[in-house]
Image: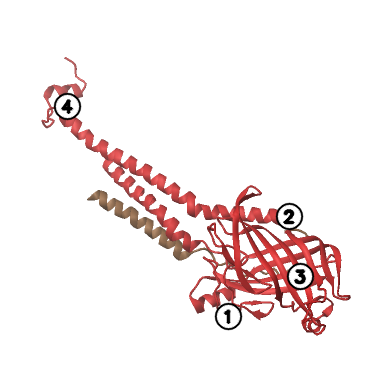
Amino acid sequence: MRRRASLVLLALAVFCTALSPLLRWYAFPQLAKVPAGQYQTAVLEAKDATLIDYATLQPRQVPKVTTVQTLKGNVEQARKVKDATGRDVVVWDTLSYVAGPDGAMVSQIPERYVFDAHTQQPVHAGGEHVDGTPVRRDGIQYKWPFLVEKRDYRYFDPMTRTSAPIHYRGTRTFHGLKVYYFEQTIPWTKVPLPRQLPLGITPDAVRQLGLERWYATRRMFWVDPTTGAPVNGEEIHREEMRWTGHPEKKPIPAFSGHVKMRPDYVDSTVALVASQRRLVLLLTSYLPWGFLTLGGCLLALSLLLEARDRRAPAAHVAHDGGKPERPTPSAGSLSRGGSP
Amino acid sequence: MRALAAAAIGLAAALALVLTLTAVGPPEGVTSPEPLLSSVPAHP
């Protein structure tokens, strides 16, 4: 009986011990992926910002400019790309809607971002665009890969529509979470005008006035290293309208402000990331270490039972001098409860 | 011999469990009916 128990324990010990590396290095890379149907919003605000008035083409100080960013996973499109490429992909349709202090639209830029659900690397399957212009992304955008490394990454800038390094600048604590801080600086670069501008103005009309749009930014992200999700983002963003072919003419500031995530969105993002973080840690740490420890304990118990099982008959044999047990008449009477 | 068989059963069960888990995978989900926002939401 003891022997059978030790064999069962041995089987369970091997089961648990084998599960540990299998979960960490086989199951995790396949199971950890960005959900195809994710829907997320973020609101960012720039207080006391400078904003161009397109009616007068003059800059003015405004109390607040708000950017509403929506990410929406397109599951049907992701399935089509998967059928075509054989890769697990996520298709995000996004909209960056910028509103002035009165809530009126300042600009809105739609995007489509297609990327590998496991690695977050862009997948070029057609349909990628920024503001209707096809782009070919290189590097990440919006989210880092799972298990972020302390190194620089390439990050896609939707304004210039090119990728540039985003530098790892150290580890910080943000709202109780240990996060990696990244920074990207984009120098003054000529960028296209958004297709949707206020007052029905078209990009062509602005160009006919002899103006072109330039932009520079310093982008900062606080990223949870386990999930790769940013828990906070800020940008020191500047835009100017410059006179085409007239560098001597003074540019018109179009926007200048320190864009920060609204505090209620910071809180909700931190809560969301903390819950997702636990799921990732379950597969990368809690379960592998738990199963390994359990496997070790079960193996020790199995060996203990096996050793006892072997020792018991040996001790019995040593006690009676190694002769086989034989019933005697007196022993028989004692067992029956008789007395002399 | 019996110990080897027990170990093999444990290993096979672990492999079967992990392969099943990865084959099934997480649910795909559906496209959210929520729109891309063009107004400032009051709260998350």
Question: From mark 1 to mark 2, how far is it between C-alphas?
Answer: 36 Å
* Residue that carries the numbered disc 4 in the rendered image: A319
Work out whether residue A157 can be spotted. Answer: yes
Q: Earlier in the sequence, mark 1 or mark 2?
A: 1
Q: Residue at x 64, y 77 (%)?
A: A129
Work out whether residue B36 can be spotted. Answer: no
Chain B pictured colour: brown
Q: Secondary structure at mark 4?
A: helix
Label 4 marks a residue whose chain is A
Mark 1 in CB contact with mark 2 (< 8 angstroms): no
Mark 3 in CB contact with mark 2 (< 8 angstroms): no
Residue at mark 3 shares a chain with residue at mark 1:
yes
Who is closer to the viewer here, A210 or B32?
Answer: A210
Residue at mark 4 shares a chain with residue at mark 2:
yes
- Say the numbered circle drawn on residue A239: 3
Residue B41 place in picture, x, y as percent:
76, 62
Say which quarter of the image contains residue A89. Answer: bottom right
* Rendered position, A336 above or below A110: above
Question: From mark 3 to mark 1, how far is it between C-alphas?
Answer: 30 Å
* Residue that carries the numbered disc 2 in the rendered image: A264
Chain A pictured colour: red
Q: Residue furthest front?
A: A248
Q: Residue at x 33, y 41 (%)?
A: A300
Q: Residue furthest right?
A: A56
- Say the numbered circle drawn on residue A83: none
Who is closer to the viewer here, A97 or A313?
Answer: A97
Mark 4, mark 3: which one is toward the viewer?
3
